[in-house]
């Protein structure tokens, strides 16, 4: 994550550095992205870069932390707009909104591809560890809506239910499609299955 000096920068400069990094990572293989490319895109000196980040891995993790917060805010907005839906409908709508966010522009698509197939496993693990609590909190909020409505029992373990959904969403691309047309259909089946255990 960034050093304190980065957080003390004016917003415009922080945005310029992140934008420069997004351009670099979205256009090249993870291993081919260099600090030189990032600083050239961001229009800062190499010395300045090292005042803000330890290395490119550090910056990459920060970008995903930042993206995670922005995406989470969009999903919370979707939850607030969709309170009249059934649980499965709500989950699918929220997950679909997340997919739209991840595919909103070529930079975000490029970053997602770097994350999924190119960045070192240790970096990927650290990013997932950062995303996990935010994702679990989001699913807890959704489940709590249906507990308050009286659709779900109050005696099941809310954290375990949130963990199941988070694990499913973060690893859905690893599921090999069988009878399903796409991974959205798989997620619906997971929602239906877990919902049976949570219902009164």
Image (cartoon, rainbow, N blue to C red):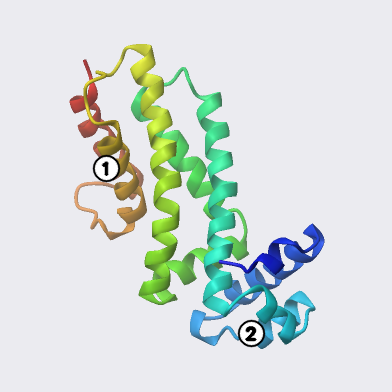
Taking the spot 75% from the left edge, 75% from the top edge, the residue there is 42
Residue 8: x %, y % from top left: 75, 62
Image quarter where the N terminus lies is bottom right
Horizontally, residue 24 falls left or right of residue 156, namely: right
Q: Nearer the viewer, residue 97 or 51?
A: 51
Q: Residue furthest front?
A: 4
Q: Tell me if I can see residue 40 in this picture.
A: yes
List x then y, in percent, for residue 196. 19, 25
Q: Quadrant of the C terminus?
A: top left
Left or right of 136 in this view: 46: right
Q: Could you tell which of marks 1 and 2 lies nearer the N-terminus?
A: 2
Mark 1 residue element: helix
Total number of numbered discs in the rendering: 2
Image vertical order of residue 32 relative to residue 83, above or below: below
Q: Residues within 10 Å of mark 1 (few under 14, many from 20)?
A: some
Quadrant of the image occupied by residue 59: bottom right
In front: 86, or 58?
58
Q: Residues within 10 Å of mark 2 (few under 14, many from 20)?
A: some
Residue 123: % across, % down = 43, 71
Foreground residue, 38 or 13? Answer: 13
Residue 103 coordinates in the image, percent (x, y)? 55, 55
Residue wearing tag 2: 35
Residue at left offset 20%, top offset 33%: 193
Element class at badge 2: helix
Q: Residue furthest top?
A: 150
Question: In the displayed structure, would residue 43 be above or below residue 200?
Answer: below
Report how far apart the C-alphas of labels 1 and 2 lie in the structure.
Answer: 38 Å
Q: Is residue 182 visible?
A: no
Q: Residue at x 73, y 85 (%)?
A: 47
Q: Are marks 1 and 2 in contact (CB under 8 Å)?
A: no
Which residue is the site of mark 1?
164
């Amino acid at each position: 994550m960034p050093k304190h000096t980065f957080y003390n920068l004016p917003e415009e400069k922080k945005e310029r550095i992140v934008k420069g990094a997004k351009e670099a990572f979205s256009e090249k293989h993870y291993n081919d992205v260099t600090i030189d490319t990032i600083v050239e895109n961001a229009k800062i000196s190499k010395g300045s870069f090292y005042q803000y980040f330890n290395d490119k891995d550090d910056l990459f993790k920060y970008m995903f932390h930042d993206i995670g917060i922005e995406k989470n805010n969009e999903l919370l907005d979707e939850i607030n707009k969709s309170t009249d839906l059934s649980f499965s409908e709500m989950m699918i709508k929220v997950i679909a909104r997340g997919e739209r966010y991840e595919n909103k522009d070529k930079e975000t698509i490029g970053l997602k591809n770097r994350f999924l197939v190119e960045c070192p496993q240790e970096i990927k693990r650290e990013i997932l560890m950062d995303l996990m609590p935010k994702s679990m909190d989001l699913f807890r909020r959704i489940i709590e809506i249906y507990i308050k409505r009286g659709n779900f029992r109050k005696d099941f373990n809310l954290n375990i239910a949130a963990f199941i959904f988070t694990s499913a969403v973060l690893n859905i691309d690893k599921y090999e499609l069988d009878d399903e047309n796409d991974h959205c259909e798989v997620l619906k089946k997971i929602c239906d299955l877990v919902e049976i255990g949570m219902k009164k």
